[in-house]
Image (cartoon, rainbow, N blue to C red):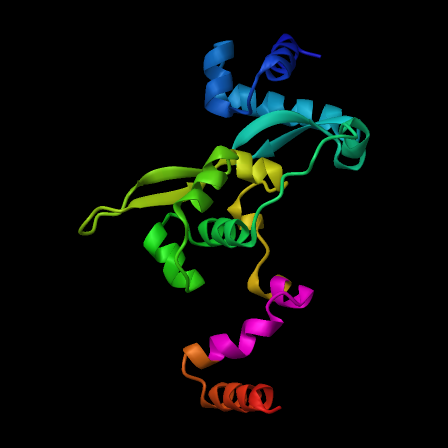
Amino acid sequence: MSPLIRALEAALFAATQPMSVEAIARHLGQGEAAVREALRELSAHYAGRGVELVERGGRWHFQTAPDLAHLLRPMHEEPRRLTRAATECLAIIAYHEPVSRAEIEAIRGVQTAKGTVDVLMEAGWVRIAGRREVPGRPVIYATTPAFLAEFGLSSRRDLPGIEELRATGLLDPVDEAYDALIGDPKSEEALRQSADGLAQP
């Protein structure tokens, strides 16, 4: 194992948070190309082991192999649970970022409590990404590398697509409503018939 790879391994092992190639190169006083090659070699070295070197959102870190994570989780640890509103907000931000609170509310169709976004920011999954250049200059939100790491995504391109979501059945209840919103007469008629059926005793 080369001195650079050993130094890289030590730096990532001691790091308190995932590191970008640029940050690693500065820390080790090496060129980015050399660091990228060393990362590839070190990642291959750890592949299939109990600890793996992975890239999430352009940042590298060691993590427990997914199939072994349950062995290290304390029995008393409570899993992080999000309310439905927080889950919806997180999904909207992930798929539409950068997005403002007003845009989130327009997509959800209901007002979003300020605390909902705050919870996502406290979890480290959402960050303020700036302000929209429109009257009032509203704050806009985006996801963080921690969000990608938490859900095992290398980038937002790995988010499930519309067909994948439909295949799980998650979109079935809203398909007709969506078609009606975009002006499909058949779907509008189907919605009216469905509503009439529900209204009957």
- Classify residue 106 as left or right of residue 77: left
| Residue at x 37%, y 62% (from the top left corner) | 106
Residue positioned most to the top: 3
| Residue at x 62%, y 43% (from the top left corner) | 81
Q: How many marks?
A: 0
Q: Is residue 178 magenta?
A: yes
- Classify residue 76 as left or right of residue 21: right
Residue positioned most to the left: 135
- Classify residue 46 as left or right of residue 83: right
User: Which x, y percent locates residue 16?
Assistant: 57, 18
Inspect this view and state whether residue 90 appears. yes
User: Which x, y percent locates residue 143?
Assistant: 46, 41
| Residue at x 61%, y 25% (from the top left corner) | 61
| Residue at x 19%, y 48% (from the top left corner) | 136
Q: Which residues make up the magenta segment?
A: 165-179
Q: Nearer the viewer, residue 162 or 8?
A: 162
User: Which x, y percent locates residue 108?
Assistant: 44, 61
